[in-house]
Amino acid sequence: METYQQESRLYKALMHPVRLAILDLLREGEACVCHMEALLGFRQAYISQQLMVLREAGLLEMRRERLNIYYRVIRPEIFAVMDAMRKVTGVQPARPTKVNACTCPNCAADSEPRLIRL
Ligand SMILES: [Zn+2]
């Protein structure tokens, strides 16, 4: 049973719409919290809370650079799990459209605001 418990702990980390959205967002590489905030439209405290769950599950790693905190997926195998689940549900989530302006260095480097379209 212990291995099942370990397994179910990981499933629990996935069992949240915002956490799934965060993981999808991190498929393309690392992103700072303010960037996730701009894309997902939730408050930073709420996003940080979900990030902590994913981090405790061993899926994410964070690094600090000046004022920004960046997160990245350290177990990319998790995307295969999500993709397999999508074959079951037949649902492919739409990419998020930016809801707020983002001042993170990745976005500020672009002369035009980066809009992720559906
Ligand atoms: Zn940004």
Image (cartoon, grey):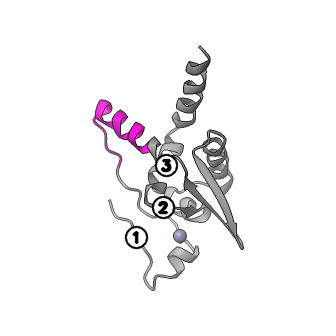
Question: What amino acid type is highlighted by mark number 2?
Answer: Gly
**Label 2 SS:** loop
Above or below for 58 versus 107: above
Q: Distance of mark 2 from mark 3, alpha carbons?
A: 10 Å
**Mark found first going from the N terminus, 3 or 1:** 3
| Residue 67: in magenta span | no
Where residue 73 appears, x then y in whole percent?
A: 53, 52
- The residue closer to the viewer here, 79 or 48, is 79
* Residue labelled 3 has its Cβ within 8 Å of some atom of ligand 1: no
Question: What amino acid type is highlighted by mark number 3?
Answer: Leu
- The quadrant of the rendering that contains the C terminus is bottom left
**Label 3 SS:** helix
| Viewer-side label of 3, 1 | 3
Where residue 56 appears, x then y in whole percent?
A: 67, 41
Q: Quadrant of residue 35?
A: bottom right
- The residue closer to the viewer here, 11 or 98, is 11
- The total number of labels drawn is 3
Where residue 27 appears, x then y in whole percent?
A: 44, 55
Give residue 29's mark. Answer: 2
| Viewer-side label of 1, 2 | 2
Q: Which residue is mark 3?
A: 23
**Mark found first going from the N terminus, 1 or 2:** 2
Left or right of 62 on screen, residue 17: left
Q: Which residue is mark 1?
A: 115
The magenta segment is: 79-93
